Amino acid sequence: MSGSRGMRGLEPWRWLGVPMLQALAATVLFGIPLRAFGLQLPEPVFPMVLAFAWAVIRPSILAPFAILVLGLLLDIFWGGPLGLWALCLLIAYGVAFTGRSMMAGQNRLILWAWYALATAIAMGAGYLFVMLDSRASPGLVPMAWQFLATIVLYPFAQRLIDLFEDADVRFR
Amino acid sequence: MSLRDNPLGELKVPLAWGAAIALIVAVVAASAILLSDRRETFKAEAYGATRRASDTVLAPVGDVLAAPGRWTGAGVDSVRDYFGAASENRELKAELKEMRQWRDVAIALRTENARYRTLLGLKTDPPIPMVAARIVTDSRGPFADTRLANTGREHGVKVGNPVMSENGLVGRVIGVTDGASRVLLLTDIASRTPVMIVRTNARAILTGDGGPNPRLDYLRGHDPIREGDQLLTSGDGGVVPRGLPVGVAVKGLDGRWRVVLASDRAPIDFVRILLFQDFTQLVNTKELAETPTPPPTPGGAAVETAPAKPVQPPTTPASATPKPDVIGAAIAKSIAPTPKPAAASPAKPATAKPDGKPAAPQAKPKPKAPPPAAGATP
């Protein structure tokens, strides 16, 4: 990020709008029915990256509502219970937001561990909600696969944090 | 002055509180939406206008995005076919030889079945119309397994219609709009499908859990299933027609019976949506729910109290009913219990024993008219 841009306020569309569209585009791309040699594309939760990174970057009133919209769009696209991923992503945001002060100044690996923790708590909550909704337990193996596919996306969250954490002088 | 000591620093605290309040409001909104959602019901309106609108938009987008994948797949198949033509030809010849024998058996069985149906006067299922569709998006997560097909309401697709690939049952339609249908896969956590094991005729409920191999719940009977048993839809409940191939039973690592789905044998790119209407849609449920009280019969009270006169049994079934097919009537007579004298009396409706079994047929007419057996009328 150039110094000149960092000296002025950060517009929401830059750190909320554009990443949101990118996450949605990636979700749609990974939703293509593609299967080769019996294998399918993984299904990571791309918006989890944003839920974590936005909480770390700064407190924001807009971010929770952006996550709500993102989660609802995810539920609509995946055809799951409406509101499920919206709630799970907000829980991940809440976890990251609560631990924000503890994450300050930590290295990448610690942040990665925090990201994995937030993802695990969100997916655990999702497990509980689905169990209550459908009166059946989701399989742990598919959950583990989705968890792994999601936590390997952490470098994208780190990239967002690096780009926007110090982008506004008021939050330094 | 350091940037960290700037006078705007105190903005952080109120902003943090504002963010926390915004988070709580968003959580409450998401919870309310989740609690009010009913995606898996059979009511078309439960799917919601938002989902219908988004599916209408998503279907063409997904179709375009999936096109390169389809072309690549077709190209890979062409190359594989070119190089594997000789070995495949050998395999197909051997398979054809075996299939010819099965064809003869099938023809013989079909003829025999047709004769039995005619003899018994069975009402067979009508042929099910179907429409073809292409899958344009796919979700495979632990909490939602659905696909979007690019055929919708304009072709008569309705909520609840079963969906098949060329290999077996895929799922059922849970939402439909113009140009798109949302298919709930058998693997989805909300999916419940009544199935039967071909070998033992035992019943079970196929329950999705987000994984590739749904499990079999509510298995009944002693030793009802073995490894490798074929499973078909049972048709119980009337939502899915009987006899659609589902898959093969396997013992899961968790010790539970699971199913390797027949539809998983090949990528699901094209599907057939069966425009099947279950009996709850075909019959007039309102009329069925109404149980009209039979009009009072003159002398009915006397039948209740006074010893009934032995009534002559009908000489032939044709006397009581419109003239049926001769062979059908003869068979019906042979399989039906002996008509009892009291069966002709309309004074009392058919009753059953408290254990749910129909009353046993009486050999001799008693002075007081017993309740007619439930199955006495042919």
Image (cartoon, coloured by chain):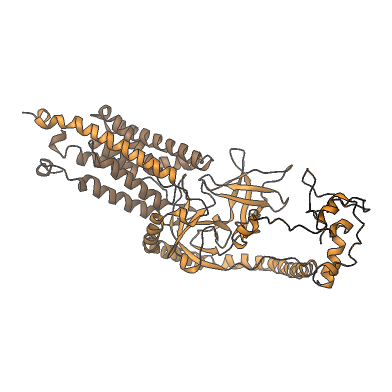
Chain colours: A brown, B orange
Relative to B104, residue B259 above or below: above
Q: Which residue lies furthest to the left in this view?
A: B1
| Residue B79 in sight here | no
Residue furthest out toward the right: B364
Q: Which residue is drawn at the image coordinates 16% and 40% (left, top)?
A: A167
Total marks in image: 0
Nearer to the camera, B11 or B72: B11
Left or right for A40, reference A102: right
Q: What is the quadrant of the C terminus of chain B in the image?
A: bottom right
> Relative to B353, is B34 on the left or the right?
left
Q: Is residue B143 visible?
A: yes
* Position of residue A16 in the picture relative to residue A128 (left or right): left
Q: Percent position (x, y) of residue B240? A: 60, 57
In the image, residue A69 lies at what x, y percent?
32, 47
x, y (%) of residue B38?
47, 48
Front-lying residue, B47 or B293:
B293
Rendered location of residue B248, percent (x, y):
63, 51
The quarter of the displayed image where residue B264 is located: bottom right
Residue at 5% from the left image edge and 28% from the top image edge:
B1
